[in-house]
Amino acid sequence: MIGKDSKVLTTYTADPAKAVFDGGLAVLTDIGTAGAAEVVAAAVLDKKRGEVIGERTFGLGTEQKLFPMTSGGGYLLTIAKWAAPNGTPFLGDDRATTGIKPSIEVKRPDTPEPLDIEALAEPQEPNPAATPTPTPTPKPAQPKVVEDIQLKKALEVLGGLAAKAAA
């Protein structure tokens, strides 16, 4: 963890001699991957232990403390940032530097783009002229089978690793 003035507060190390599994490893990530899962993904990448497949992670990785106020409100203060073994914090300055970038990028077609916080903060003016029009009730659709392209890629990568190990 990184604290005030980018000072390293806590470091955790693992002993490679105590590994319980020596096979191929693939970690799947997407925009919803955050916190401890980012620690695992970063460790796998930094130690070259396997592949991280999918999309850039959320980039939360902070430790926060709530300070209650007598008025009933409070404020939330970030007191530390989690970081990869190489020292890069998960919480970056913008979306391009936030989170963990996978070693093999596979973007799911149904993943929405992250929302811009500034756009959410701007008040929306209601339109009094707009009146809702009733919409017909749609017929229930048949469940659509969706292929998990990230999982498919991970299995492909692991299959390649297994073939190399057997040769």
Image: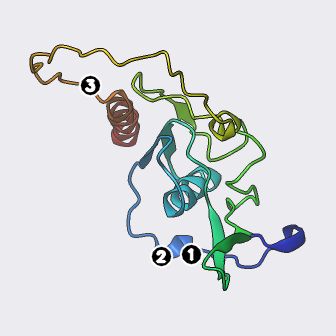
Q: Within 10 angstroms of label 1, few (less than 14), some, or many (20 or more) residues?
A: few
Q: Mark 1 points at which residue?
A: 15
**Residue type beneath disc 2:** Lys
For the point 62% across and 40% down, which residue is it? 101
- Say whether marks 1 and 2 touch (CB < 8 Å): yes
Mark 2 and mark 3: span between their CA atoms? 37 Å
Image position of 42 (left or right of 167): right
The image quarter containing residue 85 is bottom right
The secondary structure type at the circle numbered 1 is loop
Is any part of residue 1 visible from this angle? no
* Residue 122 image point, x, y percent: 68, 35
Label 3: which residue? Answer: 147
x%, y% of residue 112?
A: 48, 29
**Residue type (three-letter) at the residue carrying disc 3:** Glu
Residue at left offset 86%, top offset 67%: 6
Q: Which badge, 2 or 3, comes first in the chain's sequence?
A: 2
Residue situated in front as seen by the camera: 108 or 74: 74
